[in-house]
Amino acid sequence: MHRTIVIVFSTLDGVILDPDGRGGTPNGGWMFRHGPEAVTGDKFRLGPLFQTGVLLLGRKTWELFASIWPSRSDEFSKSMNQISKLVASRSQTDFSAWENSSRIEGELFEAIEKQKASSDVILTGSTSVVHELIKRDRVDEYRILVLPTILGVGTRLFEDGVAPLDLHLVSVEKSGAGALLRYERSTAGALAPV
């Protein structure tokens, strides 16, 4: 079985809301405040996963990415354009704006499990889907790029009320002003309630 991998930008206090500012939130755009080193290229170290995995996006993230990546030709952009993309959307049916994109058919979580039989599923954007996967304990790996900003308010990766869970630290890597943290599910599983 392959993995479900969640990739996110996060502030030091765990906020993942509007990192690039396109959402128009009052504190949006925080990921760009520390220079380009942390946010350019293969910042989540996906490497070979571009050849073997599939990217899962929410509709809004897909629309944003479809307006950015197809016109770019650097190596990272080529990888983004070539990877298979599954879009979680009930309303959108035309995915021709970005090659190798298609809508998830059927129930989302069943589609993810079916996809995992043949490839890793890399989830970016679609905070509601990420939160549901976390609640259902269906995330195998987290790649969190933490930037040294504290916002105090905003949507967090781990919401209040999430069941306790132990994770195993795989690696920590400096990325510009930030740090890329990689965590996998611990073999010990969930923590006992306190």
Image (cartoon, rainbow, N blue to C red):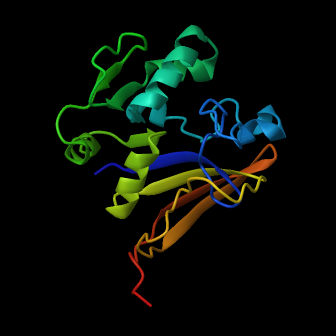
Residue 7 at x, y = what percent?
53, 45
Q: Nearer the viewer, residue 26 or 177?
A: 26
Residue 47 at x, y = what percent?
55, 35
For residue 100, say whether it is visible: yes
Figure check: 179 above or below 79? below
| Residue 121 appears left or right of 6 | left
Q: Residue furthest bottom?
A: 194
Figure check: 56 above or below 117? above
**Residue at 43% of width from left, 14% of height from top?**
98
Residue 136 at x, y = what percent?
31, 62
Q: Residue furthest front?
A: 26
For residue 139, say whether it is visible: no
| Residue 146 appears left or right of 68 | right
Figure check: 129 above or below 105? below
Figure check: 185 above or below 22? below
**Residue at 43% of width from left, 69% of height from top?**
162
